[in-house]
Image: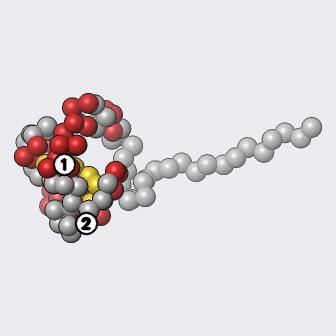
Amino acid sequence: MPARIPSFKPPRLRTASGRDESGRPNAAARGYCDKAHKAWRQAVLNKCAWQCVDCKRVAHGREMHADHVVPISQGGARYDVANGEARCVNCHSRKTAKESRQKV
C-alpha cells in the first residue's frame, strides 16, 4: 500500500490585514470572553439601540461591536457604559485603523 503524500502548509507569518500578530494574546486572554465584558457589551448596545453611532445602521449579533470611546490602553474605563458606543463592523474597523495611524 502506498504511503500517504504529506500535505504542505506554508507558514503563516501575517494575518489577512498584513499585521504580524504572532505575539498578540487571544480574545480570552485580552478579557473579551468574561461575564463582565459580555454584560458591558450588552449594556452599551442596548444604550445605543443597536444602531451605529457613525452610519446609523441597525444590526444585531456579531455585526455590531461595542467600542470604547477612550481606548483602554489610553486610560479609558474598561467596563464604564459611558465609555462605550455601538459601531458596525465597518465603522469600527475604520476608527481602529485611524487610531493606530495616529499612534505612529
The answer to whether residue 93 is left or right of residue 84 is: right
* Quadrant into which the N terminus falls: top right
Q: In the displayed image of the protein, which residue is found farthest to the top? A: 35
Kindly identify which residue carries mark 1.
Answer: 46
Q: Does residue 97 appear in this view?
A: no
Res 29 quadrant in image: top left
Q: Amino acid at mark 2?
A: Arg
Which residue is depicted at the point 50% across and 50% down? Answer: 12
**Local SS, label 1:** helix
Relative vertical location of residue 38 with respect to residue 90 in this rendering, above or below: above
**Local SS, label 2:** loop
Q: Nearer the viewer, residue 39 or 83?
A: 39
Q: In the displayed image of the protein, which residue is found farthest to the right? A: 1
Kindly identify which residue carries mark 2.
Answer: 57
* Quadrant into which the C terminus falls: bottom left
Q: Residues within 10 Å of mark 1 (few under 14, many from 20)?
A: few
* Cα distance in 3D space between marks 1 and 2: 14 Å
Which residue is depicted at the point 34% across and 50% down? Answer: 61
Which residue is depicted at the point 19% across and 55% down? Answer: 49
Spot occupied by residue 25 in the image (x, y as percentages of width and height): 33, 37
Q: Amino acid at mark 1?
A: Asn
Spot occupied by residue 99 in the image (x, y as percentages of width and height): 17, 58
